[in-house]
Image (tube, rainbow, N blue to C red):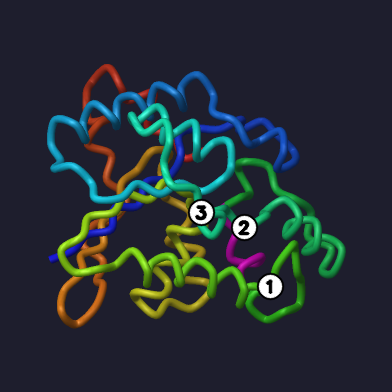
Amino acid sequence: MGEVILVRHGQANSGATDEESYDRLSDLGHQQAAWLGDYLRDREAPFDKVISGSLRRHRETAAGIGYATPEIDERLNEMDYFNLGQALEDVHGVPFPGPEEFAGHVPLVMRAWHNAEIKGVETFASFEDRVTSVLQEAAKPGTRVLCVTSGGVIGMIIRHLLNLDPTRMAHVLLPIMNSSVHRVHVIPQGPILASFNAIPHLDHDDRAHAMTHY
């Protein structure tokens, strides 16, 4: 059996208002990555391949885990949510949310993007195509691959595996935690979701503060 393990990056600059300033790990994000690296070294067999998106937060997370020179694949890069949010405001008058309104905002963005009512730097279909192509290439029998990426990419892969509509995809996206682990098993019938949003490296009384969503 093969396995693809997806890791969301550690906490980034959550106070940012644009993609460029968001794209770096906070001090806590670096610590989350280091803790995950310790856990993986203690509990996991070596990976046959380690792949990271090209964004700074992806590369910093991979380095913190212990992989300073992963294979870089831009297909693992996140959707541009800041531009999508601006497009939703321009087209439908929905303002970009604060933290308390985010849960209601994501489904609106996903539906409008899926329906081609808005567009950021790419269409929903092109985002889906590039993300699922990574999964298809990584999901090989007998091969274990670690992918360091973002929540939107993980949500899209789960949409693909479970045939979720855009609203349910949004509901999957929302709880994905920083530095969380998601497992896809590769069986003869194809890839299947084996676990979602695990944070065993943070399951300590003194790490409760490190269980973050953004």
Distance from label 1 to label 2 (Cα)? 10 Å
The quadrant in which residue 87 appears is: bottom right
CB within 8 Å, label 1 to label 3: no
Mark 1 vs 3, N-terminal side: 3
* Amino acid type, callout 3: Asp
Disc number placed over residue 73 in the picture, else none: 3
Residue drawn at the location 66% of the way across and 30% of the way down? 15
* Vertical order, 13 against 55 (above or below): above
* Amino acid type, callout 2: Met
- State the residue position of label 2: 79
- Foreground pick, 17 / 147: 147
Dot 2 surroundings within 10 Å: few (below 14), some, or many (20 or more)? many
Residue drawn at the location 46% of the way across and 71% of the way down? 133
Distance from label 2 to label 3 (Cα)? 14 Å
Q: Secondary structure at mark 3?
A: loop
Mark 2 vs 3, N-terminal side: 3
Q: Does 53 appear in magenta?
A: no
